[in-house]
Image: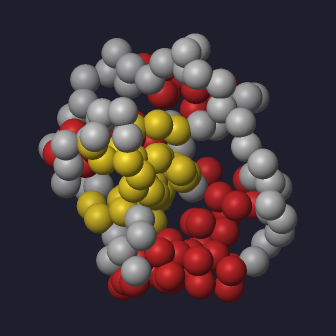
Amino acid sequence: MTPIDTSAPWVRPATIDDLDALSDLFNQYRMFYDQADDRRLARDFLAERMTRDESVVFVVPVADGLAGFAQLYPTFSSVSGKRAWILNDLFVSPHHRRQGVAGALLARCLAHARDSGSAWLTLSTAVDNDAAQALYRRFGFEQERKYLTFSHALS
């Protein structure tokens, strides 16, 4: 398991000033998951999450914008009676991969979950995303074996 190092000063919470650069990355992230190129949708979605405080976004700034981002959504664990987090989005620009950006973002998300007294942090990824799965395992994530997860698309 990779030790969690939260000392990297280059991972920070996103602000509304990051919205343009973040929207570009978020649009790339959506296209990675076979969604249409729609920067306006990406910007509007992020702006709404940020202005309503409905998510926590961490970013890695670089000279020409942002190298990557991670977005957490809050939820709750009825069984433990505590807050929990869903790491819904983690993306690194292709130009900045293999430089520790994803690991730094993941470490910051785990630290945030711990610091907020959460019961757990959960995530999911595509079954063929071997690189992401290897990263998550290095950080101590385990594939769920106790519960089945079901979903129902509504649109």
Could you tell me residue 80's position as x and y percent?
Answer: 30, 33
In the foreground, 66 or 110: 110
- In this image, 10 relative to 97: left or right? left
Residue for point 66% across, 32% down = 149
**Residue 126, visible in the rendered structure:** no
Quadrant of the snapshot with the N terminus: top left
- In this image, 77 relative to 68: left or right? left
Could you tell me residue 111's position as x and y percent?
Answer: 23, 42
Looking at the picture, does residue 57 appear above or below residue 148? below
Looking at the picture, does residue 46 appear above or below residue 139? below
Q: Quadrant of residue 7?
A: top left
Residue for point 46% across, 47% down = 86
Residue for point 75% across, 29% down = 128
Quadrant of the snapshot with the C terminus: bottom right
Residue for point 49% across, 18% down = 142
Looking at the picture, does residue 134 appear above or below residue 92? above
In the foreground, 75 or 115: 75
Could you tell me residue 117's position as x and y percent?
Answer: 19, 43
